[in-house]
Image (cartoon, helix red, strand yellow):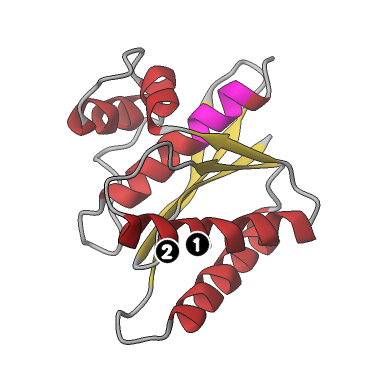
């Protein structure tokens, strides 16, 4: 089973693609970030996210798309754009009839670390260990939490949606 995990955002959308074997082991197929420019209109930013997600779907043919949900927000200014990005991601999945699994950051931490209040560093270390990576995930030489978060979302979705 192939799972596309996504940490949505309008400036940076993290993605992680993992393969889950019958023995519940995960291997990384790809990960990275989709970057948009702040000087672009919101419509063009969303279009870029949508197009890039469609490319990932076409290339990897995921059986499941797992998306991080906003379960609370501190700032309406950031919650709305994140929700819009999530919307175009869900649309891309729906157009290809791919099931969607929404997971909260708490669920990701529980799935990856076993503790819902784990620190980001703990989560990244466990993702590195679970996926046998040589180093913490980063995108194009830049250290970005979004790609690591997306890999955690993919793992969590694979465990939550499909119990083998």
Looking at this rendering, what residue extends furthest in the front direction? 76
| Residue contact between numbered discs 2 and 1, judged by CB atoms under 8 Å | yes
Q: Quadrant of residue 115?
A: top left
- Picture coordinates of residue 139 (x, y %)? 30, 59
- Left or right, residue 39 beside residue 65: left
Observer-nearest of 3 and 50? 50
- Identify residue for label 1: 85
Label 1: element kind = helix
Label 2: element kind = helix
- Identify residue for label 2: 81
Residue 27 badge: none
Q: Residue at x 67, y 16 (%)?
A: 163
Q: Which of marks 2 and 1 is in front?
A: 2
Start and end of the magenta stretch?
Answer: 154-160
Observer-nearest of 148 and 46? 46
Count residues near mark 1 (Cα–Cα under 10 Å), then give few for <14, some for 14-19, many for 20+: many
Quarter of the image that includes the C terminus = top right
- Left or right, residue 85 beside residue 142: right
Q: Which residue is drawn at 43% across and 52% down?
A: 31
Marks 2 and 1 sit apart, C-alpha to C-alpha, by 6 Å
Q: Which residue is drawn at 21% across and 61% down?
A: 142
- Left or right, residue 130 beside residue 140: right
Q: In this view, does 25 lie above or below 145?
A: above
């Amino acid at each position: 089973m192939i799972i596309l995990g996504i940490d949505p955002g309008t400036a940076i959308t993290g993605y992680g693609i993992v393969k889950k074997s019958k023995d519940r082991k995960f291997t990384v197929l790809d990960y990275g970030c989709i970057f948009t420019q702040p000087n672009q209109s919101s419509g063009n930013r969303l279009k870029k996210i949508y197009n890039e997600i469609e490319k990932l779907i076409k290339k990897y043919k995921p059986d499941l798309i797992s998306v991080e949900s906003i379960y609370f927000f501190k700032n309406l200014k950031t919650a709305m754009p994140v929700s819009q990005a999530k919307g175009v991601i869900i649309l891309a999945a729906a157009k290809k009839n791919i099931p969607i699994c929404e997971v909260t950051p708490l669920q990701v931490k529980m799935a990856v670390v076993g503790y819902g209040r784990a620190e980001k560093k703990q989560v990244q270390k466990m993702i590195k260990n679970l996926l046998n990576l040589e180093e913490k995930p980063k995108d194009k030489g830049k250290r970005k939490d979004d790609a690591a978060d997306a890999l955690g979302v993919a793992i969590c979705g694979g465990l939550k949606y499909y119990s083998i």
